[in-house]
Amino acid sequence: MKQIKSYILSIILATTVLFPAYSQDTLHLTLSETVRIAQEQSPQAIAARHSFRASYWNWRSFRANMLPSLTFTSDPSLNRSISSVTLPDGGESFVHRNQLMIDAGLTINQNIPFTGGSLFVKTALQRLDLFSEKTSSYNSTPVVVGYEQNLFGYNQFKWDKKIEPIRYVESQKNLVETLELVAAQATQQFFRLATAQTNWEIAQYNYANADTLFQYAKGRYNIGTITENEMLQLELNLLTEQTNMMNARIEVDDCIQSLRSYLGINNASELVADVNEEIPHFNVDVKQALGLAYENNPEPEYLQRRRLESESAVAQAKASRGFKADLYMQFGLTQTNEKLKEAYRNPLDQQLVSLGIRIPILDWGVGKGKVKVALSNRDKVYTEVEQSRNDFELNVIKMVKQFNLQADKVTIAQKTDLTAQRRNDVAQKLYLLGKSTILDLNASISEKDRARREYITALYNYWSLYYGLRSMTGYDFEKSRELTFDYEQLMK
């Protein structure tokens, strides 16, 4: 037995030299550290933050559009030209123009979401200099109050007031959900590396054992206690395990490169996934999960927004089809004088009312067709939304049930792994004592390797469901708290 142990030790040392597992700049990562780094600097997390910033400023723009706006306007012009004018007798004459027009105005505008119109108050002043006559005059408009309205038309403000708040809430929930999906993706990358490292460790262990058994079998073959066929089978096992070891190392390097790229890590050439075999044990209530999903997941807001947008499209199609009228009214004061002060004295009142009408008489069914298309699309959206809502509920229920069973699956896989390892140890001892065949030994090795891989897979499935459930419900069931994000801090 001492000779066998020395063989195993020498092989492990040799493979360590030929295939160094860890270099000096090795970074050991736990799953929680991997998730934290991914949520801070992975491309998906960065893109999610930028997407929320865009949604935030769209929301700010919408809110600003509902508030009064103040606008300054000025359009000065210098005119030195010869142009034609109409004389009192109806004839035409060319005159030389040499004048400067300077104007300035302030306008306060307030959109009215209920009607879709716009109320405005403005004041303006104009100065006209005629250089040829060496005269100047002023035209003042101390105050003008006006209103403009598209009658019977599509009210964009009304629909924006319904849709935009839902869109903003959806963007907030989308950010939380995306960060949890990033955690799920990081979990996948982490366990890919963990699986590759497990295969690498298995390959090293199996190669060392295969070499030991082959060396031991040589002595037994020389004294005639085993057949040549069995000797060749052991040699074939050794060559197979050597190939498996090289392939496993390549797989480890590929997974390291993939994880390093995903996490944006450049200061370590070797990454090691430290798998924590302890998992939190808790059950999730299906009704609670459904309620939290409807409260925190962006999917309900997305479905509601789709319904409203389809109804908005119908309203727009109907408005563009029928009778149209544009109303413009303004009432105010005005005065003109050669002196600025006098231009504001005893102002005269002014009124302007304009009503534009357009009535389609014959459009060959174009307007009706647009309405029918919009109605059909709306009904289609209603059907899709209802189906999506049902699928959403079923996905939540399915994930909760799978998660509640997964902890037990991990426990069973862990016990299976330990049992398979012990069986393999026993099978090796029995073979060395000549009490079992090479087929029994190979079977125990296969079972050991499969049990170890299935245990790692069970751990991955648990954590994948863990973060998937968090992303779907926006809730941390382990700590009994909602997942939140400091949105204001993000905008600084």
Image (cartoon, rainbow, N blue to C red):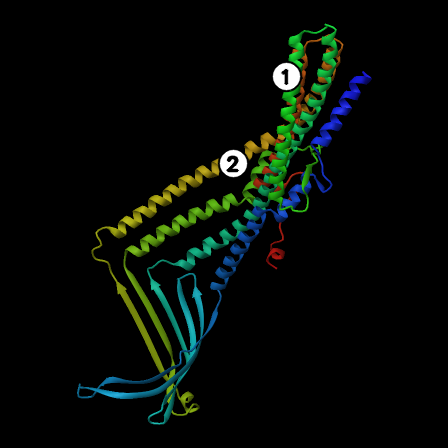
Dot 1 or dot 2, earlier in sequence: 1
* Residue occupying the point 35% across, 54% down: 316
Question: In this view of the protein, which residue sits in the foreground, 16 or 421?
Answer: 16
| Residue 157 image position (x, y, % from top left) | 42, 59
Which image quarter holds the N terminus? top right
Q: In the figure, 63 relative to 369: above or below?
A: below
Question: In this view of the protein, which residue sits in the foreground, 250 or 424?
Answer: 250
Between marks 1 and 2, how big is the CA–CA gap?
A: 54 Å
What amino acid type is highlighted by mark number 1?
A: Leu
Residue sitting farthest toward the top? 224
| Badge 2 density bin: few <14, some 14–19, many ≥20, Cα 10 Å | some
Which image quarter holds the C terminus? bottom right
- Residue 452 visible? The answer is yes
What amino acid type is highlighted by mark number 2?
A: Glu
| Badge 1 density bin: few <14, some 14–19, many ≥20, Cα 10 Å | some
**Residue hosting label 1:** 236
The image quarter in which residue 350 lies: bottom left
The image quarter in which residue 342 lies: bottom left
* Residue occupying the point 40% across, 75% down: 145
**Direction from residue 298 to residue 98 in the image, left or right:** left
Of discs 1 and 2, which sits in the foreground? 1
Disc number for residue 181: none
